[in-house]
Image: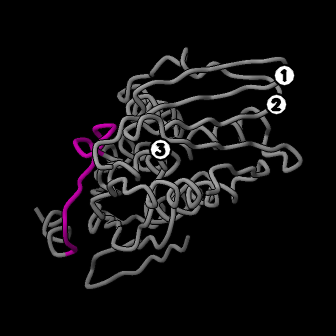
Amino acid sequence: MQISSVLEDGSYIISIDGDVDASSSIKLDEAIAQAVADGQSDILINCENLNYISSAGLGVFMSYIEELKAKNIRMVLFGLSERVENVFKVLGLDQLLNIVETKDQAKQRTHE
Amino acid sequence: MNNQLKVPCRKEKLKDVRQFVEQFLQQRGVSEIEAGEMVLAVDEVCANLMIHSHQCNPRKHIGVKIKMINHDQVQFEISDYGVGFNFCRYKEPSLEDIIKEKKKGGVGLMLVKRIMDSMEFIRKANRNVYRMVKRVHSV
C-alpha cells in the first residue's frame, strides 16, 4: 500500500493506493496525523485506487472523528469503489463520515 | 481444486489469505459485493488470531478451508492450535463508544458478525476451529 499527500489548488489530498489492512493501516494513520499536525483545515482522502479496506483502516478513520470535530477540521473521502463503500455501509460508517463520489464534490464539500 | 491454505502468523500474509478466498469465490460466480464481504470477514478473523492469539509469531500457523454447501452456502473453517477464543460470545461494543474513546480497533468482529449468517467455535484437544457460513444469492 502506498500513501501520498499533496497540496493541490489549496486542497490537502491524501491518496491511498492498494490495500489498507492490519499490516498497512499504520501508514494511513501517520498520514492523517501529519495533516492534522500541519494545521490543515480540510483533508481530502482520495480512495480512487483504494482496492481494499479492513477494520484496521476503518478504525483509523473512526479514531479521528472526535479530534477533527474538536479542531474544526473537515475530512472528506471520495472515489470509493462500490465494494469498498459497502464495507463502510456494513457498519453504518457512511453516515458518520463525509463520503462523496468525486474530487470536485469533495472540494465543494470543504467549501460549504 | 485447491480449497485449503496454511499461512504463518505474519500480518503481511493476510493478502495471501484474501487472494485465496477471492479466487475460490470468483470461480464459483459469487457476486463482487458478496465476495468482498466474505473476503473481509475471513481477513478479520485471521488478523485477530495472528495478532491476539499468536502475537504475530511466524512459527505459528493458521489454516483456512473453504467449501460450498448445497450450492448456495459457503462454509469457511479457520483453524489454529493453542489458546482459543470463542468468537461467538464476543459482545459488540457500540460504535459511539469506540469513536468517543478514539480506539483504532474493535470493529473487526463486529463486521464478521454482520456479514456471516452463522458462526461456530469448535475446540477439540488443542485445536480451535472458527467456522462461519454465509448464504450467497448470486450462484
* Three-letter amino acid code at the position of disc 3: Gly
Q: Are marks 2 and 1 in contact (CB under 8 Å)?
A: yes
Q: Which residue is mark 3?
A: A59
Counting labels gives 3
Q: Is residue A83 above or below residue B79?
A: below
Numbered disc 2: secondary structure: strand
Q: Chain of mark 2?
A: B
Q: Are marks 2 and 3 in contact (CB under 8 Å)?
A: no
Q: Chain of mark 1?
A: B
Q: Which residue is mark 2?
A: B81
Residue plotted at (22% across, 42% down):
A95
Residue A98 at x, y = what percent? 23, 53
In the image, taking residue B30 as reference, residue A11 lies left or right, namely: left
Residue A93 colored magenta? Answer: yes
Q: Which mark is residue B126?
A: 1
**Disc 2/disc 1 C-alpha distance (Å):** 6 Å
In the image, taking residue A53 as reference, residue A82 lies left or right, namely: left
Numbered disc 3: secondary structure: helix
Q: Quadrant of residue B65?
A: top right
* Three-letter amino acid code at the position of disc 2: Tyr
**Disc 2/disc 3 C-alpha distance (Å):** 28 Å
* Three-letter amino acid code at the position of disc 1: Asn
Residue B97 at x, y = what percent? 41, 25
Quadrant containing the N terminus of chain B is: bottom right
Q: Chain of mark 3?
A: A
Q: Quadrant of residue B125?
A: top right
Q: Which residues are magenta?
A: A89-103
Residue plotted at (36% across, 81% down):
A7
**Disc 1/disc 3 C-alpha distance (Å):** 32 Å
Front one among B6 and B72: B72
